[in-house]
């Protein structure tokens, strides 16, 4: 339940940043949008985010056309890593088998640059 709430709140924070933070908008315009999602391996908890320079939409589940997916071993691993979303935390999670990246790692770098402005 905590992970579901955290992912829902992340959607609100993204929408708020789009409205209020010009640096966030500028970075998103450079990227020309990004569709990404976060889920547990069993897909018991999953949420996706579709970001364009003009809007951000979010919803339950993981559509198959996403640019990037972050798959976590379980809810606890996801919460632990998402609380401090540094590059080192994700790298350690990948090495330990707690995080799996589905998609291009360049998209992950773009996402991390964008999330700095939240």
Image: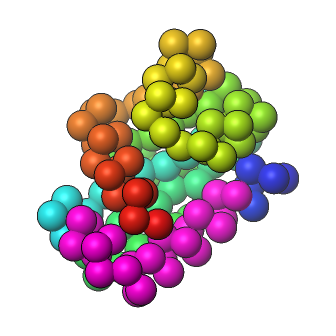
Asked if one can make out residue 40 in the rendered structure from this viewpoint, the answer is no
Q: Is residue 48 left or right of residue 83?
A: left
The percent position of residue 92, horizontal first and vertical second, equals: 53, 20
The percent position of residue 48, horizontal first and vertical second, equals: 51, 56
Q: Is residue 101 left or right of residue 32?
A: right
Is 48 located above or below residue 79 in the figure? below
Is 117 located above or below residue 99 in the figure? below
Q: Is residue 42 left or right of residue 90?
A: right
Image: magenta residue range: 6-28
Q: Nearer the viewer, residue 52 or 116?
A: 116
Q: How is the image coloured?
A: rainbow
Picture quadrant of residue 99? top right
Principal SS element in the magenta part?
helix
Q: Which residue is situated farthest in the left direction here? A: 30
Q: Nearer the viewer, residue 37 or 109?
A: 109
- Asked whether 70 falls inside the magenta stretch, the response is no
Q: Which residue is situated farthest in the bottom direction here? A: 19
Q: Nearer the viewer, residue 21 or 65?
A: 21
Residue drawn at x 58%, y 74% is 12
Q: Nearer the viewer, residue 7 or 88?
A: 88
Residue drawn at x 84%, y 53% is 1
Is 87 located above or below residue 58 in the figure? above
């Amino acid at each position: 339940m905590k992970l579901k709430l955290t992912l829902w709140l992340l959607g609100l924070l993204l929408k708020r940043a789009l409205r209020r933070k010009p640096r966030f908008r500028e970075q998103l315009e450079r990227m020309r949008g990004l569709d990404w999602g976060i889920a547990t391996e069993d897909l018991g908890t999953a949420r996706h985010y579709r970001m364009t320079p003009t809007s951000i939409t979010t919803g339950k589940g993981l559509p198959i056309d996403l640019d990037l997916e972050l798959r976590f071993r379980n809810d606890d691993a996801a919460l632990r890593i998402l609380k401090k979303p540094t590059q080192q935390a994700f790298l350690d999670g990948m090495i330990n088998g707690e995080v799996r990246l589905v998609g291009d790692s360049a998209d992950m770098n773009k996402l991390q640059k964008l999330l700095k402005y939240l």
